[in-house]
Image (spheres, helix red, strand yellow):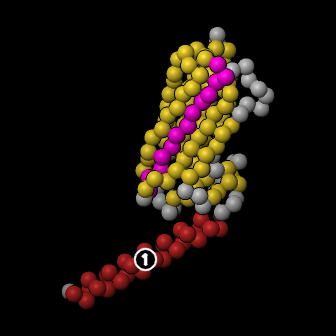
Amino acid sequence: MKKMKQLLLVFSLLLCFLFGTVQVTAANESLGKIVDGSVLTDKSEVESTAYPWARGAYLSGGSGYLAIVGSGQVKMSGSTVAYQTVDEIKVTLYLQRLKSDESGWVHIATLGPKIAKNTDYVSNSQTYSVTHGYYFRVHGAHTAILNGKVESMTSNSDGIWVS
């Protein structure tokens, strides 16, 4: 019985080593690849800041942030900024995971919309548990409304590998 336990332990360690190596190789092979505008990186945190192509009347910009904060834990946050006080300002954040075939991103969590009234700034953040062995990014939707006129834009961070 003791030999069986030892054999099972050695076999388990071998499997962990084998699959751990495959995940690192998969990340390294994809490093630097661009998928839907996001660069796949080996960074532990990424941030995106987007500005309207043409200066908006009141929407200044939006940002998204994603960081690895623990084993299988990421913190997602983002904000929307206006040039002036608006009737309503919103930020919605989407945690996205890269598809296994690297053909695009899938939404795995939505945070918001968080809405603030009669101000020029809104932000939101939350920590999530994620599956190891994938790239993740944050996609943000940013909106400002003044006197019934809506201005909006999106932002996308680069991808980070969660091993």
How many marks overall? Answer: 1
Residue found at x 67% / y 15%: 149
Residue interval drawn in magenta: 72-84
- Give the main secondary structure, helix, strand or loop, of the magenta stretch: strand
Residue found at x 59% / y 65%: 27
Residue closest to the eye, 121 or 89: 121
Q: Is residue 130 visible?
A: no
Q: Using residue 146 as the reference point, say whether residue 109 is left or right of it.
A: left
Residue closest to the eye, 119 or 26: 119
Q: Using residue 148 as the reference point, say whether residue 8 is left or right of it.
A: left
Q: Using residue 8 as the reference point, say whether residue 153 is left or right of it.
A: right
| Among the 4 quarters of the image, the one containing residue 57 | top right
Q: Using residue 53 as the reference point, say whether residue 44 is left or right of it.
A: left
Q: Is residue 144 visible?
A: yes
Q: Residue furthest bottom?
A: 3
- Please tell me whether residue 64 belongs to the stretch shown in magenta: no
Which residue, given by chain and number where applicable, does mark 1 sit on?
15
Find residue 65 and report its horizontal and vertical position in percent.
Answer: 56, 44
Find residue 52 and report its horizontal and vertical position in percent.
Answer: 73, 31
Q: What quarter of the picture does the N terminus occupy?
A: bottom left
SS for tag 1? helix
Residue found at x 69% / y 20%: 58
